[in-house]
Amino acid sequence: MKKVLQSVLLIQVFLIFGGCQKEQPAKVETTPIASATAQKVTSSVSSTANATSAAAPVAHPKATATEKDWLAKLVKLTNQVEYRQRNQNIWNQAEGELSFMKYDALQTKNSATAEVVYQSGSTLDVRENTLIIFDEDPGKKKKAEDRVIIKSGQLTGRTKTELWIFTDAGLVQIKAKKGQTNVTKVAEAKVVVKNDRAVNIKVKTGTAEVIYKKDNEYTRLAVAENADVSIKPSTELTSGVQVNADKVSELVTAQTKVAAVAQAELTVDFPADNALVQDSEIEIRGRLTGAGAKLLINGQLAEVSDASTFSKKINLQPGTNLIVFQLVRSDATVKFLRRSVRYQAK
């Protein structure tokens, strides 16, 4: 009996000891991995989101950056398009869909184009030999969530909200407006940076304002639809591919004054549109009102009298002739008027 009890005790001890040895490896394997993961997550959170606990839902920090914090994405490209991340000086060939963060850059080479879409749906049609840098509103997207800095080249911006385009000459703000049916129309503007860093702005639809520095004061200029504005470079916003954030902030927050602009109107008394004439030479007549306004007819400057009238003789070719009137207001906005004249000899 005593031997039987000893045997039973030995079996129990063996089972208990064996069970502990069986469960121990699982505990030893899981603990270091969980601890390392917690330390890694905690470090990532504390450096990016100032979190203090590994219990926060940050198991996929990269997913957060690509799905939430990106400003714009590259959705289409042709030929050689390159990109540079904000913390790098190396340009890489763009392939497929790319997400851009603040201060990331994109550039197109010869015969290359790119299309960029913001989270809000605003788009940038980037033409060849263009360098742009992505920016964001320091107010955490309270007003102008779509921002871009164009260093060289040309782009066309479209938005149903508001789009800010920074240049070395000033800031272009385009904003959509609602139509008669209360439907928001897309605002569209083309910005061209010339070799001397002067900027030309063409507003197709929507409203636009240009803020630039003139006589050491910031001036805000309202630009109408179908108008052209040219501004000279006044302050350097970028140096190479690095952004001068202080200059950008200065331009955005500066107190601006509205430019005093004399209204100018063009009236063409002769010829009427689609007129039929029998003389190879005609005299164009009309009136131009507005202080400081200039008139070009087929690219040639027309003289305007003190009585605000003008006349200019031009030669016609057999058939239909196009006459282009270009009114340049004192604020540098441009208005075009076209007349077709058909010349048929007697």
Image (cartoon, helix red, strand yellow):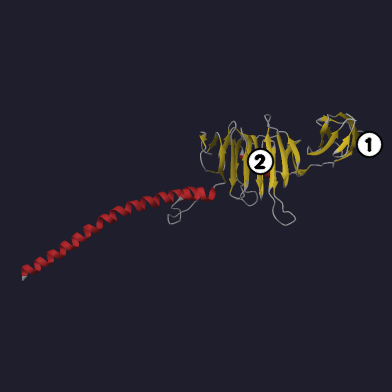
Circle 1: is it few (<14), some (14-19), or many (20+) Cα within 10 Å?
few
Furthest toward the right, the residue is: 307
Residue 240 as seen in the image, left or right of residue 304: left
Look at mark 2 in the image and give the residue it sits on.
Answer: 156
In this rendered view, identify the residue nearer to me: 313 or 184: 313
Regarding residue 7, the answer to whether it shows in the image is yes
Which one is in front in this view, the residue at disc 1 or the one at disc 2?
Answer: 2
Instruction: Name the N-terminal-most of marks 1 and 2.
Output: 2
Residue 141 in the image: above or below residue 10: above
Residue 50 as seen in the image, left or right of residue 322: left
Circle 2: is it few (<14), some (14-19), or many (20+) Cα within 10 Å?
some
Q: Position of residue 104 (x, y in %)?
A: 55, 40
Cα gap from disc 1 to disc 2, whole angstroms = 40 Å
Q: Residue at x 94, y 36 (%)?
A: 307
| Quarter of the image where the N terminus is located | bottom left
Q: Position of residue 103 (x, y in %)?
A: 57, 40
Q: Residue at x 63, y 37 (%)?
A: 150
Name the image quarter holding residue 337.
top right
In this rendered view, identify the residue nearer to me: 222 or 218: 222
**Badge number at residue 307:** 1
Furthest toward the bottom, the residue is: 1
Residue 254 in the image: above or below residue 14: above
Q: Are marks 1 and 2 in contact (CB under 8 Å)?
A: no
Name the image quarter holding residue 243.
top right
Q: Residue at x 56, y 39 (%)?
A: 77
Which element is circle 1 on? Answer: loop
Furthest toward the front, the residue is: 346
